[in-house]
Amino acid sequence: MVVRRKRSADGLLPFGNGWGGARKGAGRKPNGERAGVSRLRREVLAARFPVHVTVRLRQGLPCLRRKNEYAALRRAFAAGCERFGFRLVQYSVQRDHLHLLAEANGRGALARGMQGLLVRVAKGLNRLWGRRGSVFGDRYHARVLCTPKEVRAALVYVLQNAKKHGLRYAQAVDRFSSAVWFDGWREALTVRGLEGVARPVAASRTWLMGVGWRRHRLLGFDEVPKPAA
């Protein structure tokens, strides 16, 4: 039997037949519950601009803000903080994600440096946890910082990110971050116990990260990050 589809008066097939068009739930699914990082071409990165990078763990893995996990991360950072034209300048470790401030000679250098750094992190954590397999849930997210104000806001956001999540710590600064190696605090910071600890961050080489942001005043221990735009 031949089924004939009813046509409208102008000869076009009527809408609302349930075939084709946008459908709820259609399309490629993201990894995990969170939407994935866009696969579109990444933002152009010039060597003079720092970049704020965020990377998240796969769901179900242990918390990163613990002594042994942080030691593994710090070793990986120290080994991979300056390679392939890439420099890790500042960082903070949260329960299930990392915030990094980096510099790179271009987008390719950023990609190579991040790949090497995250491979080191994954190997160190898997060794600690006695597991195999991927550690990160998706591609990293990168935002280029083009002005002194953007860089200062990013420094507050990264170094004080634990306050954003309502986490408390006894010290003046978060010990699960590079804050103890940061020299841009308004208040005096005394740190003990770093003798023999490999430095996990590289020195900045861009004007924006090294000098420019300071024109808008140094950072204070009491500052809380503003919501990301």
Image (cartoon, rainbow, N blue to C red):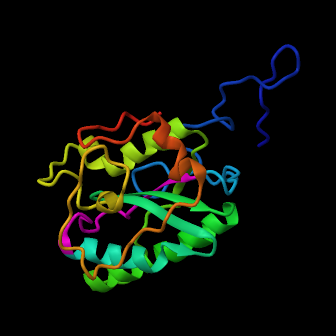
Q: Is residue 22 above or below residue 127?
A: above
Where residue 215 appears, as percent x and y from the top left, is 49, 37
Residue 149 located left or right of residue 49: left
Quick one: which residue is furthest to the top in this view? 9
Q: Is residue 72 left or right of residue 137?
A: left
- In the image, 218 versus 14, the foreground residue is 218
User: Is 209 contained in the magenta span?
Assistant: no
Asked if residue 29 shows in the view, the reply is no
- Residue that appears at 48% across and 48% down: 35
Position of the N terminus by quadrant:
top right
Q: Position of residue 142 (x, y in %)?
A: 55, 53
Instruction: Identify the residue at horizontal 88%, vertical 20% (top origin).
Output: 11
- Left/right placement of residue 119 relative to residue 198 reads right
Q: Specify the farthest residue to the left.
A: 170
Magenta portion: prevailing SS class: loop
Where is residue 15 shown, x and y percent of the image? 71, 24
Q: Residue furthest front?
A: 188
Image position of 87 with respect to 15: above or below: below
Residue 134: quadrant of the picture: bottom left
Q: Nearer the viewer, residue 183 or 110?
A: 183
- Please report the residue visible at 50 percent of the width from the left and 42 percent of the height from the top: 213
Magenta region includes residue 61 = yes
Q: Position of residue 16 (x, y in %)?
A: 65, 25
Residue 201 visible in the displayed image: yes
Q: Nearer the viewer, residue 153 or 68?
A: 153
Q: Residue at x 49, y 65 (%)?
A: 203
**Magenta range:** 50-67
Query: Does residue 122 sit above or below 187 in this rendering?
Result: below
